[in-house]
Amino acid sequence: MTTTDIYPPTAIPRHNGAQGWFARAEAWLDARGRGAWIAAMVLGFVFFWPAGLALLAYMIWSKRMFSKSCTTRSMGRDHSAFSAARHAMRSSGNAAFDAYKSETLRRLEEEQDNFEAFLARLREAKDKAEFDQFMDDRARRASRADPDAAAQTQA
């Protein structure tokens, strides 16, 4: 029995030479995280320095060196934050503590909303002050550049 007996010919993945090998190697390294990429780069430098240099260039170009996309630990951190938030909402069994906790969380959320509104107003005020300064500077430059036109507009 061959693979074509089990799968139709269109379902069998085809890899074209080096591109298929490269894609499989990239997926294998991504599955193992940033450490695997760094180890491959170091081994490339040890055995054949242009290969290590090429891996370093590829890691920087594809942003694998500085992103968290290929790390397996980032998923664990996101999951633990979600788990902690879910655990915080769970009842402790003590009614007084649960009431205190819900009141405190409500108050903190209200304070956070108020603070975010304050920051938005602060940003708007700063933007308005910068814009007013720009317009004043522009008007001063225009009056210095053409004193006859400024005199005509004032009259």
Image: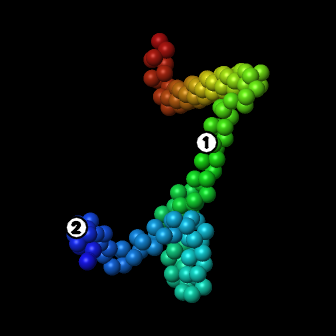
Q: Residue at x 45, y 23 (%)?
A: 149
Within 10 Å of the Cα at label 2, are there few (<14), some (14-19), or many (20+) other Cα atoms?
A: few
Within 10 Å of the Cα at label 1, are there few (<14), some (14-19), or many (20+) other Cα atoms?
A: few
Q: Secondary structure at mark 2?
A: loop
Q: Is residue 78 above or below residue 115?
A: below
Q: Position of residue 56 (x, y in %)?
A: 54, 72
Q: Is residue 4 above or below residue 137?
A: below
Q: Residue at x 51, y 65 (%)?
A: 30
Q: Residue at x 76, y 26 (%)?
A: 94
Q: Secondary structure at mark 1?
A: helix
Tell which circle, 2 or 1, labels the residue nearer the N-terminal end. 2
Q: Position of residue 151 (x, y in %)?
A: 49, 19
Q: Amino acid at mark 2?
A: Pro
Q: Is residue 1 left or right of residue 136?
A: left
Q: Which mark is residue 33?
A: none
Nearest to viewer (mark 2 / mark 1): 2
- The N terminus lies in which quarter of the figure? bottom left
Residue that mark 1 sits on? 82
Q: Amino acid at mark 1?
A: Phe
- Whether residue 110 is visible to the viewer of this picture, yes or no, is yes
Residue that mark 2 sits on? 8
